[in-house]
Image (tube, grey):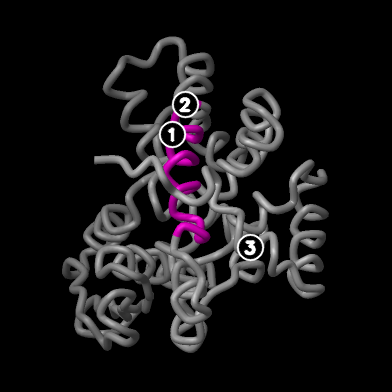
Amino acid sequence: MVNSSAPSPLGLMGLSRNRTAPTRAKIKALEATLGFSFKNPSILHLALVHRSYCNENGIDPAECYERLEFLGDAVLELAVSTELYTRFPDADEGELTKTRSSLVRRETLANIARRIDLGSYLFVGKGVEITHGREQDSVLAAAFEALIAAIYIDQGNEFTRQLILKLIDVELSQAEKSDGPPENPKSQLQEMVQGQGMNPPVYQLARSTGPDHDPVFTVEVLVNGQVVGTGTGGKKSDAEGAAARAAYAALSGQV
């Protein structure tokens, strides 16, 4: 049952009392990156706070970005769905769904977050910091969804829709040029190596670090017994995808 007695509908109570100079500097820097100023900077601050920071600083977990993440997921999906419906008039429901899934999946959102250096603005706990958690796909994608929700609350639907389209323009353009979603990196790598007469890629877990609730996996991908790519992620599947991208780039002479 939903608890309607939460201390604040947006979770801003404690954070608004703890707005230090470094916090204000982070907010201003991110606003400069985004190209506009928030009417209510506290909602942007909330979007940058990871649960680990609350846990280590005695702050109510409601003051982290998880509620905003929930809203941002819906805002992103609606904006992307509307754009795909308009941009691909000949695509059927299955094609539109597949393309949308590729655009709003964790890996894609994390890459967009990296383009705006979102990880550097996050408030995370020491444990997450030590394990480089602020660069994990899971953390970045969640924070990006929270950021979108904060913009939606502060600026409204149309402004947010236009900003989303600007932020995902690279991915939208790729989908348009290929007349469909981007290739899955593991499938892309397998097709390339088999096309060159090599054995299928083999993925192996190199190591796992971090706490049980927030692990970091490092995966190596081998082709013909040789390590050709390494990747990390908060899930083994994310790490495998990152390793596949690295291997594909290396084998095709892109790095």
Q: Residues within 10 Å of mark 2 (few under 14, many from 20)?
A: some
Q: Return the x and y of residue 161 as percentages of the image width and height.
A: 62, 28
Image quadrant where residue 26 sits: bottom right
Amino acid type assigned to the residue bearing label 1 in the image? Ala
Image quadrant where residue 182 sits: top left
Residue at left 36%, top 71%?
233
Residue at left 25%, top 80%?
212
Asked which secondary structure carries label 3, the reply is helix
Does 216 appear above or below 184? below
Image position of 219 (left or right of 160):
left
Q: Residues within 10 Å of mark 1 (few under 14, many from 20)?
A: few
Does 149 appear above or below 48? above
Type of secondary structure dominating the magenta stretch: helix
Amino acid type assigned to the residue bearing label 2 in the image? Leu
Considering only order in the chain, which callout, 3 or 2, is on the residue closer to the N terminus? 3
Does 147 appear above or below 241? above
Residue bearing the label numbered 2:
78
Q: Which stretch is magenta?
A: 62-78
- Please name whichever residue, 151 or 251, is drawn nearer the observer in this view of the structure: 151
Quadrant holding the C terminus: bottom right
Residue at left 27%, top 88%?
207
Asked which secondary structure carries label 2, the reply is helix
Residue bearing the label numbered 1:
74
- Please name whichever residue, 82 or 128, is drawn nearer the observer in this view of the structure: 128
Q: Return the x and y of residue 144 as percentages of the image width and height.
A: 54, 52
Is residue 197 shown in magenta?
A: no
Which one is closest to the eye, mark 1 or mark 2? 1
Residue bearing the label numbered 3:
15
Residue 110 visible? The answer is: no
